[in-house]
Image (tube, rainbow, N blue to C red):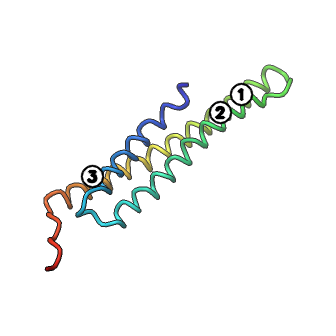
Amino acid sequence: MIALLPVAPVMLLVLWARQMRRRAVTPGWATGVAYAMIVLALLFVLGGVLIVASEMLGAAPAEPAEKARRLAEGVSEAMNNDALGLLVGGLVALWLGCCTMLWRRRRPEPPPP
């Protein structure tokens, strides 16, 4: 369960991007960039979760030292993937923050008569 903890901040970014997309003044390309980066962050984070799960479940009967070494390598790789995913998530948060500040005060243009 704790392995899924890095997914939570990325899912909050999805909610922020959805809220931003519903605003009339936000261009579609801005939320498109945000969603593309969110997918990339989720791929990294979920890849880390899958690496740990495969190392834990796929441990063939072997020496305890070999099992420990393989599990440590898997956890290390998963932590690196999670860190990269959260770094991309931080870039998404920066992007969404800048877009929100930029288009917050703009009013939608009235339709032409």
SS for callout 1? helix
Q: Which mark is residue 56?
A: 1
Q: Where is 62 relative to 104, above or below?
A: above
Residue farthest toward the front in the current orientation of the protein:
113
Is tag 1's residue or tag 3's residue first in the polypeptide sequence?
A: 1
Is the residue under label 2 in contact with that under label 1 (CB below 8 Å)? Answer: yes
| Residue type beneath disc 1 | Met
Seen at 25% across and 57% down, the residue is 23
Position of residue 14 measured from the top left corner of the image (x, y, whole percent): 40, 47
SS for callout 2? helix
Seen at 79% across and 28% down, the residue is 59
Q: Where is 105 relative to 41, above or below?
A: below
Position of residue 52 measured from the top left corner of the image (x, y, whole percent): 65, 33
Please give left or right for residue 85 compared with residue 104 in the image.
Answer: right
Is the residue under label 3 in contact with that under label 1 (CB below 8 Å)? Answer: no
Seen at 13% across and 80% down, the residue is 113
Q: Which residue is mark 2?
A: 52
Label 3 crowd bin: few (<14), some (14–19), many (20+), radius 10 Å = few
| Residue type beneath disc 3 | Gly
Position of residue 45 measured from the top left corner of the image (x, y, whole percent): 54, 42
Is tag 2's residue or tag 3's residue first in the polypeptide sequence?
A: 2
Q: Which residue is mark 3?
A: 97
